[in-house]
Image (cartoon, coloured by chain):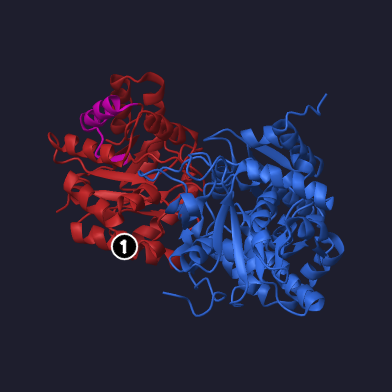
Chain colours: A red, B blue
C-alpha cells in the first residue's frame, strides 16, 4: 500500500492536508515548518513548487512563491527538502504541487523519477490537464507516484469520467471557481458535486480552495475524505515566521476534524 | 520532418506540431472547450461572416490600402517596398481585426462581460472600443509599469467606458496582466469572455485570432495581383505575441517562393538579458495555456522581457510561430531598441508616416534587407500600428521635453 492509501485506510475521520510553499520564506524556516507539520496534526502535506507565474493562485500563494524564489529556491532544493524530511519521517505522504514549466525544464520523466526516489508520493500539476499529461502519467505509473487530479464546479460529467480514469491517490475537488485563498464555498452548492464524484469512484475525495478556519474544515470534512488548507497557513508563516504559531494553527484545524 | 502543408495546423487538440495545446487549470477547461465549439459553429455560419465583413468595411475601414513607399525604396536603393497600411484601421492598429471577430463569438455564447490584457494599450483600446460598440462591460488588465508609460491609451480606454485594472504582481507588464486576466476568468467563468490580444493562450485562441487577422494577408494577395500581377517576394512583420505577423504570413505559407521575416524585439541585444526575443533567445516551455518558446532560466522560471516597445514586451510567442521557426518556413530575426528608434525617425521623415514602435522594428529590418535585394524584388511590410501613442517614449529617448 502507498503512503497515501495507508493514511486513508487507517483514518476514521477526514484527513487534514496542509499546504506550504517550499523555500518560503527561506530554505531553513521552510524545512523547520515542514518537519513540524505531522506532529501538529497534518495527515498529508502538499509542498508547493515555486513558480514565477502561478495563474491559479491568489495573492497569498503568489507572494509565497516570490519570497521563495528571491531566497534562491529551485526544483533541486525542493526535492532535497523531501529527502531531508524522509530521514526521520517515512509515513506522512508528501504531494508536490505546482505548474508544468519547471517540471518540463527539469525533464518530466527525470523529474518524476527523482521525486519518487526522494520520497514524494504524489504530484498535482495545476496546468497539466489529462489531455496533455501522457508523458508525465506514464513515468508516474512506472514509479508508483500518484497524479492527483483536480475537479472543479465547472467540470462536466463527460470530463469527470475522463479525469477519474487516470486518477489515483485522491481526487482534489476545487470548491470554488476562483483562485486559491478566495472566499469560502457554499456547502449546499458543492454537496451534489461531491456526491456525483463519490458515486463514480472509490478514490478518496479532498476538498480545497477557500478553507481557512477550523469551522470551515469541520463543515467541509463532513462532505469529503479530506480537507486542504493552504493560504491561511501560508499567511501565518508570512506574518509570524514562527513555527509554534503555525503548529498551533494546524492543531486547531486537526482538532476540528476529530 | 518538413510539413506537406503549412496551412493545415493546428490539429484537433490545438497542436501546431508539438506546440500549442491547452495547458490550463481544470476550472477553465470546460469553458475553453465551449469557446472552441462556439468558434467552430460561427465559422460555418454565413451570417457570422456577413456581420463581421460589414463591420470590417464600415467600422474599421477595410480593406486597408497597399501603399508603394517610393521614398523609402529610392533611399534604400534595392527592393521595391510596399506598406500594408493596417495603421489606418479604426483605433490605429491591427488589433481591431481580432477584437471584432472575438466579440461576435462572445455574443453568440451569450457572455455578458469582456475581459482582456494589454501591454502597449492597443489591444485594450481595441477591446474597449468593440465593447462600447456592443454595449458590454469591459475590464482591461494592464501592468502598473505599462500604465505609466502608456498614459494616453489608458485615458482612451476609460473614455470608452472600460475599467482599467492595474496589475502590480511580477514586473507589472504584459505577462503579469495576462496572469491576472486568467485569474479573473477562472473566477468569473459563468458570464465572462476573455478576449485575448494575440495568437497565444490555450487552443482555440491562437487559431481563432490568426483566422481573424488573416484578412491582412488575404487582402494583400488580391491587392498585389491587381497592382503587380504577381505575388510579393518577401513579407516583413514585427513580432511580440505575433498576431499581425501571423495574419500577414498565413495566407502565403504554402507559396514557396514568398520569403517571410518575423522581427523580434532585440532590446539591448539578444546576447544580453534585456530583450524580448523568445525564439532567438528563449526555449520551449509552458505558460499561459500553451507550449511555445519562452524566455526563462534553467529552472523553468519565466524571465522578464525588455523592449522599448510595450507591445512587444512579452517573454513568449504564439505557438504557430514556434512551429514555423522549427520548420524554418519563416526567418525570425531581431532588431535592437536603438535600430527601431532610428527606423521610427527614418520612416517618419521619408514617408510622412509615423509608425508605432512595434512596426518600427519591422522597418528597421527592411532598412537592412532592402539594399541587398534587386530592384525587381517586391517586399511588403505590415505597418501594423500608428505611432501617435509612442511620441512620449520617443521624445524621452531623444532627450526632448514635450510635456511642459
Residue B290 position (above or below residue B207): above
Q: Nearer the viewer, residue A18 or A143?
A: A143
> What residue do we see at 31% from left, 39% from top?
A47
What type of secondary structure mainly makes up the magenta span?
Answer: helix
A129 left or right of B306 in image? left
The residue carrying mark 1 is A135
**In the rendered structure, does residue B97 fall within the stretch colored magenta?**
no
Residue B347 in sight from this viewpoint: yes
The quadrant of the rendering that contains the N terminus of chain B is bottom left
The quadrant of the rendering that contains the C terminus of chain B is top right
Residue A101 position (above or below residue B70): above
Q: Quadrant of residue B388?
A: top right
Q: Position of residue A94 (x, y in %)?
A: 24, 43
Which chain letter matches label 1? Answer: A
| The residue stretch that appears in magenta | A26-47
Q: Nearer the viewer, residue A223 or A30?
A: A30
> What residue do we see at 81% from left, 75% from top?
B227
Q: Residues within 10 Å of mark 1 (few under 14, many from 20)?
A: few
A200 left or right of B151 in image? left
Residue B116 position (above or below residue B260): above
> What residue do we see at 61% from left, 66% from top?
B260
Q: Position of residue B190 (x, y in %)?
A: 60, 54
Q: Nearer the viewer, residue B121 or A38?
A: B121
Query: In the rendered picture of this protein, how many numbered marks are placed on residues?
Result: 1
Q: Position of residue B104 (x, y in %)?
A: 72, 63
Q: Nearer the viewer, residue A209 or B65?
A: B65
Q: Quadrant of residue A208?
A: top left
Q: Position of residue B279 (x, y in %)?
A: 49, 54
Residue B354 in sight from this viewpoint: no
B279 left or right of B81 in image? left
**In the rendered structure, does residue A41 fall within the stretch colored magenta?**
yes
SS at badge 1: helix
Amino acid at each position: 500500500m502507498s503512503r497515501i492509501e495507508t493514511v486513508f485506510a487507517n483514518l476514521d475521520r477526514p484527513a487534514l492536508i496542509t499546504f506550504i510553499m517550499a523555500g518560503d520564506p527561506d530554505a531553513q524556516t521552510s524545512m523547520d515548518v515542514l518537519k513540524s507539520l505531522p506532529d501538529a496534526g497534518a495527515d498529508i502535506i502538499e509542498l508547493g513548487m515555486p513558480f514565477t507565474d502561478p495563474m491559479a493562485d491568489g495573492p497569498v500563494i503568489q507572494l509565497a512563491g516570490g519570497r521563495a524564489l528571491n531566497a534562491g529556491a529551485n526544483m533541486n532544493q525542493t526535492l532535497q527538502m523531501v529527502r531531508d524530511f524522509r530521514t526521520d519521517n517515512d509515513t506522512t505522504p508528501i504531494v508536490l504541487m505546482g505548474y508544468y514549466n519547471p517540471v518540463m525544464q527539469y525533464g518530466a520523466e527525470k523529474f518524476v523519477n527523482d521525486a519518487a526516489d526522494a520520497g514524494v508520493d504524489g504530484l498535482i500539476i495545476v496546468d497539466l490537464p489529462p489531455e496533455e499529461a501522457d508523458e508525465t502519467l506514464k513515468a508516474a505509473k512506472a514509479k508508483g507516484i500518484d497524479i492527483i487530479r483536480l475537479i472543479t464546479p465547472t467540470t462536466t460529467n463527460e470530463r469527470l469520467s475522463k479525469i477519474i480514469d487516470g486518477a489515483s491517490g485522491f481526487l482534489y475537488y476545487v470548491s470554488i471557481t476562483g483562485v486559491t485563498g478566495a472566499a469560502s464555498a457554499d456547502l449546499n452548492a458543492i454537496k451534489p458535486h461531491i456526491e456525483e464524484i463519490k458515486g463514480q469512484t472509490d478514490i478518496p475525495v479532498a476538498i480545497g480552495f477557500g478553507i481557512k478556519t477550523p469551522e470551515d474544515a469541520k463543515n467541509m470534512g463532513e462532505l469529503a475524505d479530506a480537507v486542504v488548507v493552504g493560504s491561511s497557513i501560508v499567511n501565518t508563516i508570512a506574518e509570524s515566521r514562527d513555527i509554534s504559531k503555525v503548529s498551533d494553527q494546524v492543531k486547531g484545524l486537526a482538532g476540528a476534524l476529530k | 520532418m518538413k510539413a506537406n502543408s503549412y496551412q493545415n495546423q493546428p490539429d484537433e487538440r490545438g497542436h501546431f506540431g508539438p506546440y500549442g495545446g491547452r495547458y490550463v487549470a481544470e476550472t477553465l477547461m470546460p469553458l475553453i472547450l465551449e469557446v472552441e465549439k462556439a468558434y467552430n459553429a460561427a465559422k460555418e455560419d454565413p451570417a457570422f461572416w456577413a456581420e463581421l465583413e460589414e463591420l470590417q468595411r464600415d467600422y474599421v475601414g477595410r480593406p486597408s490600402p497597399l501603399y508603394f513607399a517610393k521614398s523609402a525604396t529610392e533611399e534604400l536603393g534595392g527592393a521595391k517596398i510596399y506598406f500594408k497600411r493596417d495603421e489606418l484601421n479604426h483605433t490605429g492598429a491591427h488589433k481591431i481585426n481580432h477584437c471584432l471577430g472575438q466579440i461576435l463569438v462572445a455574443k453568440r455564447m451569450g457572455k455578458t462581460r469582456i475581459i482582456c490584457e494589454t501591454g502597449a494599450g492597443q489591444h485594450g483600446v481595441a477591446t474597449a472600443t468593440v465593447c462600447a460598440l456592443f454595449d458590454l462591460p469591459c475590464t482591461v488588465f494592464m501592468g502598473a509599469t505599462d500604465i505609466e508609460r502608456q498614459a494616453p491609451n489608458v485615458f482612451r480606454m476609460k473614455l470608452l467606458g472600460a475599467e482599467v485594472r492595474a496589475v502590480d504582481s511580477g514586473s507589472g507588464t504584459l505577462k503579469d496582466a495576462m496572469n491576472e486576466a486568467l485569474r479573473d476568468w477562472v473566477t468569473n467563468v459563468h458570464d465572462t469572455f476573455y478576449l485575448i490580444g494575440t495568437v497565444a493562450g490555450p487552443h482555440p485562441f491562437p487559431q481563432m485570432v490568426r483566422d481573424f487577422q488573416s484578412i491582412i494577408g488575404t487582402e494583400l494577395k488580391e491587392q498585389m495581383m491587381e497592382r503587380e500581377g504577381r505575388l510579393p517576394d518577401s513579407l516583413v512583420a514585427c513580432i511580440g505575441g505575433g498576431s499581425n505577423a501571423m495574419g500577414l504570413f498565413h495566407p502565403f505559407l504554402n507559396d514557396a517562393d514568398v520569403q517571410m521575416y518575423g522581427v523580434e524585439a532585440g532590446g539591448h541585444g539578444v546576447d544580453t538579458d534585456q530583450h524580448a526575443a523568445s525564439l532567438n533567445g528563449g526555449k520551449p516551455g509552458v505558460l499561459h495555456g500553451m507550449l511555445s518558446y519562452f524566455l526563462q532560466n534553467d529552472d523553468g522560471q519565466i524571465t522578464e522581457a525588455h523592449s522599448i516597445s510595450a507591445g512587444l514586451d512579452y517573454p513568449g510567442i504564439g505557438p504557430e510561430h514556434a512551429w514555423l521557426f522549427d520548420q524554418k518556413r519563416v526567418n525570425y530575426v531581431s532588431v535592437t531598441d536603438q535600430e527601431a528608434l532610428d527606423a521610427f525617425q527614418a520612416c517618419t521623415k521619408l514617408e510622412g508616416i509615423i509608425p508605432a514602435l512595434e512596426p518600427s522594428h519591422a522597418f528597421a529590418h527592411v532598412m537592412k534587407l532592402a539594399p541587398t535585394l534587386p530592384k525587381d524584388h517586391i517586399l511588403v511590410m505590415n505597418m501594423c500600428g500608428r505611432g501617435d501613442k509612442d511620441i512620449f517614449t520617443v521624445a524621452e529617448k531623444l532627450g526632448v521635453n514635450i510635456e511642459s
